[in-house]
Amino acid sequence: MESAVTLSGLLNFIDGLWSSCGDERIIVFTTNHKDWLDPALLRPGRMDMHIHMSYCTTCGFKLLASNYLGISNHRLFAEIEKLLEKAEVTPAEVTGELMKSDDAETALHGLIKLLQSKKMVLIEAKTCKGETTDGEEKHDDGKVTTKDEREGNKQDEGQMGLVNEDDTRK
């Protein structure tokens, strides 16, 4: 037998939670899509406070690194901060990576791998939509490169003795 939850049933349940609480209580509801919820669920008296939880920021990462690894600075922080600007990762995902190892080096390398994969997911999604972000260039083959990647490739080619003719004319 299949059980279905109706909006009316959910509203009655929520209202019942409030009426059965003699003392002050905090009840937390979460959703990834607030705009999909019926306005009756969101009205004052049912849900009095709405808090938007953003993706992890540099400041948030530093706080998490301090809390979970006991460090306030590390040689990998600069790379992580750069990746945080390009990737969409939640504080919970960052915490999960930092908790995988007591060794800061190992935990931070794991976080870098996560951030790189999240960055690639965003780039691929934008490529499918035909979009690029600031500093990115979309090539005829569909590949997207960042300014840093292009500059790194030019440096590598110069070190190997491969110089583009256009570069020598400057």
Image: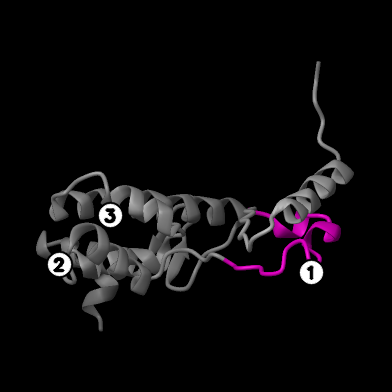
Earlier-in-chain disc, 2 versus 1: 1
**Residue at the location (20% across, 58% down)?**
69
Cβ–Cβ under 8 Å for marks 3 and 2: no
Q: Identify the element where label 2 is drawn.
A: loop
The residue labelled by disc 3 is 112
**Residue at the location (37% across, 69% down)?**
60
Cβ–Cβ under 8 Å for marks 3 and 1: no
Any mark on residue 44, and which?
A: 1
The residues colored magenta run: 32-52
Horizontal and vertical percent position of residue 146: 38, 65
| Viewer-nearest of discs 3 and 1 | 1
Horizontal and vertical percent position of residue 116: 34, 53
Q: For the residue marked with disc 2, what is the amino acid?
A: His
How dense is the environment of label 2, judged by Cα within 10 Å: few (below 14), some, or many (20 and up)? Answer: few
Horizontal and vertical percent position of residue 122: 49, 55
Residue extending furthest bottom?
170
Residue extending furthest right?
8
Seen in the image, is 78 located left or right of residue 24?
A: left
| Viewer-nearest of discs 2 and 1 | 1
The residue labelled by disc 2 is 74
